[in-house]
Image (tube, rainbow, N blue to C red):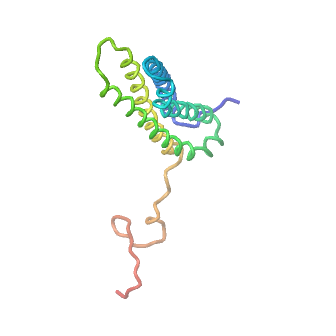
């Protein structure tokens, strides 16, 4: 029995974009941490980049879990709201990490031969791309593409009588 994709095809493309962006962010964050350790103590650099590392691996866990469950119908339908919540949190974390790397770029000294800036630029680019992928996944996970449209809104239910041209009825007990 072949596994059927439980998410819109755009969602699968966004998951793959997320993995590719994660690799860019991993390389940039690793290089930025390495460059920091060349000029500062290990403890200082560990404290400076701990949020970014935590965010990176939280995002990886979410992307892997989502990639596995998009092929399992019951697991995906059960976990859809959970994924939506966790990707909402991950998007906030990713954007804060992107902000940290972008401000490192704009505040730090500009030198054409400074390879440390390239590492910070790569990390910033990776985190920004992760944010874009996460925003897309929030839209795809929040929208139920496979559900049929609702039969009729509550104010247009049959048997409610003269609702007027816009389908809105007002009921009153006042004598007319």
**Residue 28: where, in percent of width, then height?**
44, 21
Q: Residue furthest front?
A: 41
Residue in front for this viewpoint, 80 or 64: 64
38 or 87: nearer the eye?
38
Q: For the N terminus, which image quadrant?
A: top right
Q: Position of residue 105 (x, y in %)?
A: 33, 25
Q: Nearer the viewer, residue 49 or 64?
A: 49
Q: Provide residue 133's location: percent of width, then percent of height.
A: 45, 32
What residue appears at the point 49 percent right and 51 percent down from the top-left corner? 149
Q: Is residue 146 left or right of residue 94?
A: right
Residue 150 placement (x, y as % from top left): 49, 54
Q: Tell me how many marks there are.
A: 0
On screen, residue 158 above or below 41: below
User: Is 23 above or below relative to 11?
Assistant: above
Residue extending farthest bottom: 175
Picture quarter containing residue 98? top left
Answer with the quarter of the image where residue 102 lies: top left
**From the viewer's perspective, is residue 152 above or below residue 126?**
below
Quadrant in which the C terminus is drawn: bottom left
Position of 136 compared to 103: left or right? right
**Residue at 30%, 28% in the rendered image:** 107
Outermost residue to the top: 113
State left or right for residue 59 relative to residue 96. right
Residue in the picture at 55% in, 42% down: 83
34 shown above or below 15: above
């Amino acid at each position: 029995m072949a596994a059927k994709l439980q998410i819109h095809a755009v969602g699968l493309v966004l998951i793959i974009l997320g993995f590719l962006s994660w690799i860019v962010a991993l390389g940039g964050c690793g290089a930025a941490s390495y460059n920091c350790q060349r000029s500062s103590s290990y403890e200082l650099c560990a404290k400076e980049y701990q949020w970014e590392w935590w965010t990176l691996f939280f995002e990886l866990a979410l992307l892997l879990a989502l990639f596995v469950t998009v092929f399992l119908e019951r697991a995906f339908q059960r976990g859809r709201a959970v994924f939506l919540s966790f990707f909402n949190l991950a998007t906030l974390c990713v954007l804060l990490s992107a902000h940290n790397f972008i401000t490192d770029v704009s505040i730090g000294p500009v030198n054409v031969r400074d390879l440390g800036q390239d590492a910070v630029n790569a990390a910033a680019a990776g985190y920004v791309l992760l944010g874009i992928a996460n925003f897309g996944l929030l839209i795809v996970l929040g929208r139920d593409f496979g559900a049929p449209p609702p039969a009729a809104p509550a104010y247009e239910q049959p048997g409610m009588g003269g609702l007027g041209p816009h389908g809105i009825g007002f009921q009153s007990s006042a004598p007319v």
